[in-house]
Amino acid sequence: MSAKTTNEGTEQRVILVTGGNRGIGLATALSLSNAGHKVAITCRGEVPAGIKEANIFTVNCDITDSEQVDSAFTEIEEALGTVDVLIANAGITRDGLVLRMSDEDFSAVLETNLVGNFKLARRATKGMMKSRWGRIIFISSIAGRIGQTGQANYAASKAGLVGLSRSLAKEFASRGITVNVVSPGPILTDMLAALPEEQQVSYAEAVPLGRLGNPEEVADLISFLASDKASYITGAVIPVDGGLYMG
C-alpha cells in the first residue's frame, strides 16, 4: 500500500508537538495539521478551540515523568501510528537573580526543559529506528546562546539542548534520524504580550529587523526541518531572531 500524502504532495507523517496548546507549539501544530499531517500535542490544561477544530489528537503528559512519557507515546501510537517527528517545545521558566534563586527553582527548570526533553527523545527514537526515518526538533532559545539576566536556570537548560541534540544527531544518523535545534529570539507569544508595552518596544528596537517575531515564522522553519526537504540537515542550531544573535 502506498504511503498517504499531504495536500503539499509530501508523505503524511505522525507528528508530536509538546506544549502545543499555545505560542510556538500551537502555531506549529496547526500549520502541520493544516498541511495534512496527523498531529498530536501534549496539553496540560484547557485545549484551545483551534486544536479541536483542526482534529488534533491531545494527550496529557508530564514530560519529567518517564512513565507518563511512555504512556503518551503508546496512546498516540494506538490512535495515529508510530511517531515520525518529535517537536520538543514544552518548557517552563522560574526567573530570578542567582543570589535569590532556590535549588528547587534551578532544578525544576533543568528537569523539565532538558531532562524531560531527553526522556521524550529517548522514547521517540524507538519507533524511528524501526522505520529508519525520523525527525527530532528541539525548541531552544536565544537565552541559551547569549545568556539572560535573571534566567540562569532557563539559559542553562536551553544551552544544554544543543549538546544533547548534537550527541543524538551523531548517535542516530545511520538510522535516518535527524536532530536539530531551533533557537527563537523575541517572539510575540502570550508571555511576551503580557509585558509592558515599553518593554516590548525595547525588545523590538534591539532586533536588527526592528520588530518582534511571530510564532508562525518559527513554525515555518520547524515545518521545513520536519520534512524530507531537510534530509541533509542534522546537528544544526538555527536562529529565528531577526538577526539579534549573529554567532
Image (cartoon, helix red, strand yellow):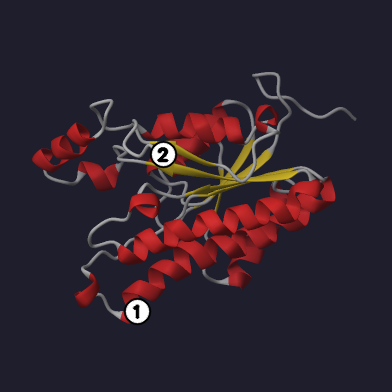
Which residue is drawn at the image coordinates 49% and 36% (left, top)?
28
Residue 54 shows in this picture: no
Image side of residue 244 versus residue 107, left or right: left
Q: How many marks?
A: 2
Q: Position of residue 243 (x, y in %)?
A: 34, 32
* Badge 2: residue crowd in 10 Å (few <14, some 14–19, many ≥20): few
Which residue is drawn at the image coordinates 69% and 33% (left, top)?
232
Q: Name the residue tied to disc 2.
A: 49
Q: Earlier in the sequence, mark 1 or mark 2?
A: 2
- Kind of residue at badge 2: Ala
Image side of residue 122 versus residue 92, left or right: right
Question: For this rendering, which residue is in front, 201 or 43?
Answer: 201
Image side of residue 197 versus residue 186, left or right: left
Q: Nearer the viewer, mark 1 or mark 2?
A: 1
Label 1 element class: helix
Query: Do the CB atoms of the residues marked 1 and 2 lie less than 8 Å apart?
Result: no
Which residue is drawn at the image coordinates 26% and 33% (left, top)?
207
Q: Position of residue 64 (x, y in %)?
A: 52, 69
Query: What distance separates the C-alpha of mark 1 from that of mark 2?
Result: 34 Å
Image side of residue 197 versus residue 18, left or right: left
Q: Position of residue 193 (x, y in %)?
A: 22, 41
Q: Residue furthest bottom?
A: 103
* Quadrant the C terminus occupies: top left
Question: For this rendering, which residue is in front, 129 or 153?
Answer: 153
Q: Residue furthest front?
A: 247
Label 2 element class: helix
Q: Is residue 85 placed above or below 65 in the rendered structure?
A: above
- Kind of residue at badge 1: Glu
Q: Quadrant of residue 99?
A: bottom left
Q: Quadrant of residue 7?
A: top right
* Badge 1: residue crowd in 10 Å (few <14, some 14–19, many ≥20): few
Q: Name the residue tied to disc 1.
A: 104
